[in-house]
Image (cartoon, coloured by chain):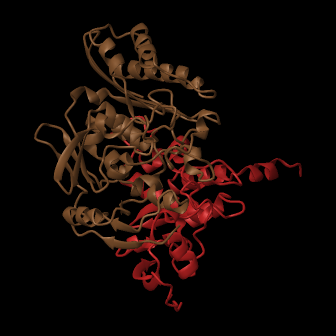
Chain colours: A red, B brown
Amino acid sequence: MEVTQSTVSGAVAVTLNVNGKKRSLAIEPRVTLLDTLREHLGLTGSKKGCDHGQCGACTVLVDGQRVYSCLALAVMQEGKEIVTIEGLAKDDVLHPVQAAFIDNDGLQCGYCTPGQICATVALLDEVKQGSSSAITPNLEHPPQLAELSEAEIKERLSGNLCRCSAYNGIVAAVQQLVGQTPPSAAADVMVKEMPA
Amino acid sequence: MNNFSYSRATSVQNAVQRASTDKNAMFIAGGTNLVDRLKVFLDEPSQLIDVSRLEMKQLEPLASGGLRIGSLVTNTALADAPEVRRNYPMLARAILSGASQQIRNVATVGGNILQRTRCPYYYDTAFPCNKREPDSGCPALTGINRTHALLGASDQCVAVHPSDMCVALAALDAVVEVTGPKGKRQIPFGDFHRLPGNTPERDTNLEPEELITAILLPPLPFAKSGVYLKLRDRASYAFALISVAAAVDLAEEQIKDVRLAIGGVAHKPWRSQEAEQFLIGKAANAATFEEAAKIALQSAKPLAHNRFKVELAKRAIKRSLMLSAAGGVV
């Protein structure tokens, strides 16, 4: 996509590395990473929910770590590797986290989903690297992926809200991703229990 | 938000020098509090000096056996550090119980101690607020004040300090290392944050041109059994109604030494030295801890809606002391 150079007064030249591509643009220092992605780079997958770091819909990965793009100034992100929801799938093949959300009905309206998925990608990496959470019983023995409890998943995803309350499906998606057998989706159970 | 100019500091000296030539300049590192504040016009800087790329990201052992934490160490990096998990678990737990992973990945230790109150009246510029606009009034005094201060407040301001990490740092006798135009100085943690008094607009004793460069943690062997207990309106991603950082050093069944700090009760992380003094030499049992909790809250002045926090704090203190005395398992 061609990027139109902004000529707004006070704008500064910024080069960002987004989804593996260098993008040069002119933006004011006050512009957040979220607004830059959505308004200047045409990447509208990252969503603006609260715009105050409370809902998680704007979650993206910066140097492999999940961050709220609404609380990050774009001008401060130069030289960092930014990955958004648009950068996860490889050509036509979904990222495993995207596929798991679909398999487990981890969404209803979908507005929070890009943030939930980016957060989950990072969560799996954090567990692999041995990070503990506030509810990890022994800080020095953080859970491995296969032992990640439902409570741990919920705690580690508490920075992403879902107003449709698709939390059961989201937790199930994470359980599937770590090799556990998630419970069947409620709708599936209802279909099976319906008289023939 | 208003626009501002932006530049990257090249060194600590350079950052301080730039700040000293513009009284409306502000430093930015993680920005998780500042960017939010800029959006609601709580801060209107002429320029932001980006200090996030300076060399202040190291965790280093001190010759004393303690730890020097560079001010740009992120909350995540600090909570995950093996020496923090092992030697200062109350600090790791305090950090992990605060905010969300997204915030902790970006937020820095220096920024965390400069976090400003989340008092809703302070945040909403449609209301008067003595902290925002001196002598304009405090709507929290007669408004909805269930989350507000119990201890050390004034008739000018009843806001509470929001940080979890700072409660642990207060209990651990941390020291804040800063650099200003006149050079370096060290500020004991208890002297860093201020009570509101007649100057609620000032949260800390940091001077405007000073930059926090590190936090120093002295060695405290019994902090290994330290605990952090946080009580809030929802299970995760919420500020504390009450929190407690506690560590008990036992000799046989007797209390040899103790550290006790409370969050969610005052304009600063509240170190309860009176309760600590009472505990030293006493038998470690429920009755002793209950008495200590009473002492810690004896000067509480509840407001119309936060009386429940007095009892909540007492029970949280008792429980935290019991847990630490039992070895620190939460």
What residue lies at 61% left-to-right and 40% top-to-bottom?
B139
Looking at the image, is A135 positioned above or below residue B285? below
Depth check: A19 or B103 in front?
A: B103
Residue B64 drawn at (x, y percent) = 12, 37
Depth check: A148 or A167 in front?
A: A167
Depth check: A153 or B315 in front?
A: B315
- The image quadrant of residue B7 is bottom left
Decide if residue B140 is in sight here: yes
Residue A119 drawn at (x, y percent) = 51, 59
Residue B244 drawn at (x, y percent) = 42, 29
Residue B270 drawn at (x, y percent) = 39, 30
Decide if residue A92 is in sight here: no
Looking at the image, is A29 positioned above or below residue B257? below
Residue lying furthest left? B63
What residue lies at 64% left-to-right and 50% top-to-bottom?
A167
Residue lying furthest right? A196
A33 on left or right of B191? right
